[in-house]
Image (cartoon, coloured by chain):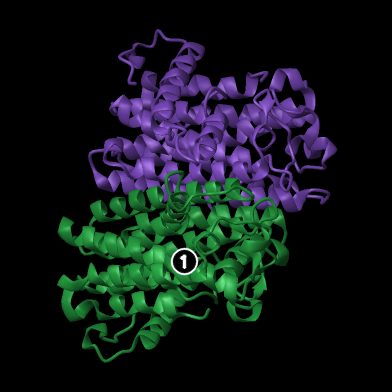
Chain colours: A green, B purple
Amino acid sequence: MASDVNVMTGRETLPEAMARVAREVEAALDDLLPVPEGSEARLAEAMRYATLGGGKRLRAFLVLESAALFKVDRRCAARVGAAVEMLHAYSLVHDDLPAMDDDDLRRGKPSTHRAFDEATAILAGDALQARAFEVLAEPDTHSKPEARCELVAALGLAAGARGMAGGQMIDMLAEGQTFTVEQIIRLQALKTGRLIQFSAEAGAILGRAPPHQRTLLAAYGRDLGAAFQIADDLLDAEGTTEETGKTAGKDAASGKATLVAVLGTQRARAQADMLAAQAAAHLESFGPAAGLLRDLAAFVVARRQ
Amino acid sequence: MASDVNVMTGRETLPEAMARVAREVEAALDDLLPVPEGSEARLAEAMRYATLGGGKRLRAFLVLESAALFKVDRRCAARVGAAVEMLHAYSLVHDDLPAMDDDDLRRGKPSTHRAFDEATAILAGDALQARAFEVLAEPDTHSKPEARCELVAALGLAAGARGMAGGQMIDMLAEGQTFTVEQIIRLQALKTGRLIQFSAEAGAILGRAPPHQRTLLAAYGRDLGAAFQIADDLLDAEGTTEETGKTAGKDAASGKATLVAVLGTQRARAQADMLAAQAAAHLESFGPAAGLLRDLAAFVVARRQ
């Protein structure tokens, strides 16, 4: 599961590193997700369908690269990366449900409730969330139980009512309403920002880093998440369904509150670029070791899918 | 939040003790659940609606009484009791959804998706699950992080694909199918048994009890949970909507797989009584201190609501 590649050589490019992390996390997920068996096999199948074989694994990349700054065992970091991806996958499954965003397409495939059914999708999301916390708490994740508890508590905060779920609640209420720029920024900080921030902080938790370094990684994650969300909304507004693997133009059609809708594409793009530069600046004191994380900030605002 | 009542006097009756624990856990839940504020206030309202002011708090009672066997600080045990009740409440919210059991009534009130809406109910369940794990991992729950990690990992296992969510999956697939007695027993062991078993084991985890005592409490919880489920199915078959606070006769109407349907009420009742006696027998070595837990076994099969 772990890779022997030394990410500190500085010779690996960002796309190479992202592809390598995606493979490592895929292997960890395959190992950690339940195997379909027994009368409930359909549930494990849906969990695997929703989680495996897709996505850029941005969150896992943040975990593994922030952990590498502190020379954390990559097998431990890959477990945390896998847990964050399970949490993220569950949120996509539930967000796509008919009662939520009602989306039939995800990562270019039918969304989980379309490939299975609604009940199975709800349960698969629920079981993915439970498994994410379980994985973090298991001894293999870190030799020190304090570190594992900090990971669980921080992920719980990022995922819950003051984080991801709270953001999705605001997003549901926002449809058809007029939101101010400040309201949209807070919505997105909760909905996608907190989990991305957690992912960047996770390396510091795993590495038992001093508080000021954890704070820097948190600030990096916060700005990166905000930049990422604007870039995502720009893709939705400008991209095609084929490019993005999800239904294009959906935000505008459903009256979703996005900065692109309020500021226009040009100002939104400028804001994303500014946030990406700010994110990279937080990591200056980490020197060349944080090169890939700084490159990632530029990447998220330049990506076309 | 904590009570100064000494539960070891042996003078408190089971109904008194259950009422006292229900009050303690209600206070802990009120303290631990998010306060409705900000644009996402509706989410915290739904979480509170689904969790506060209802139920027998059977699972919390198991946590607090098993913890009392090891003289665990009641404030710590009340947090774990509250976390289990949050997890249980989330499962009821999601089970009641139209795509699942489609139930309009819960604890005599409109179910959460009826009182709010489907999207809010899905998110409230999701956020309750996240908060349950977060509470377990927080330092106030136990001075030893090992104990907190064990609680998180055990609850994750009990709630996930090999536990509660897996059981609900089988239950969904079972509708209209013919199940054997063995299949129904396994379904119910996963769907309700694992969380009840966790609740009884939690006291041993909090009390850092030796493995054989944890095993005894787990065995007690397993048999108690099985007895409880049959009693619940008997109530559904025999009780009225008014008595049970949920739609009566629903299992038979929807073709749910229950032991009552397969064995008939008389044999099902005999089986429940046998399991309750077996549950109580596991606690013999704990002596008079486990009196209330033994009484509880008799109570769950005798209850009328």
- The quadrant in which residue B140 appears is top left
Viewer can see residue A8: yes
Identify the image quadrant of the N terminus of chain A: bottom left
Name the residue: 72% across, 64% down. Answer: A114
Q: Which residue is mark 1?
A: A230
Viewer can see residue A37: no
Considering depth in this image, is B143 or B223 the residue closer to the camera?
Answer: B143
Q: Give coordinates of residue A84: x percent, y percent.
A: 42, 62
Q: Give coordinates of residue A224: x percent, y percent.
A: 36, 67
Q: Is residue B53 above or below residue A83?
A: above
The answer to whether residue B103 is left or right of residue A174 is right
Q: Is residue A43 above or below residue B19?
A: below
Name the residue: 29% across, 85% down. Answer: A4
Badge 1 sits on which subunit? A
- The quadrant in which residue A73 appears is bottom left
Q: Give coordinates of residue B177: x percent, y percent.
A: 82, 51
| Secondary structure found at label 1 | helix
Q: Is residue A111 above or below residue B172?
A: below
Name the residue: 82% across, 42% down. Answer: B255
Q: Give coordinates of residue A290: x percent, y percent.
A: 23, 76
Name the residue: 64% across, 69% down. Answer: A249
- What kind of residue is marked 1? Ile
Considering depth in this image, is A207 or A263 the residue closer to the camera?
Answer: A263
Structural crowding at the residue carrying mark 1, measured as other residues with C-alpha within 10 Å and reported as few (<14), some (14–19) or many (≥20):
many
Considering depth in this image, is A97 or B274 the residue closer to the camera?
Answer: A97
Considering depth in this image, is A163 or A125 the residue closer to the camera?
Answer: A163
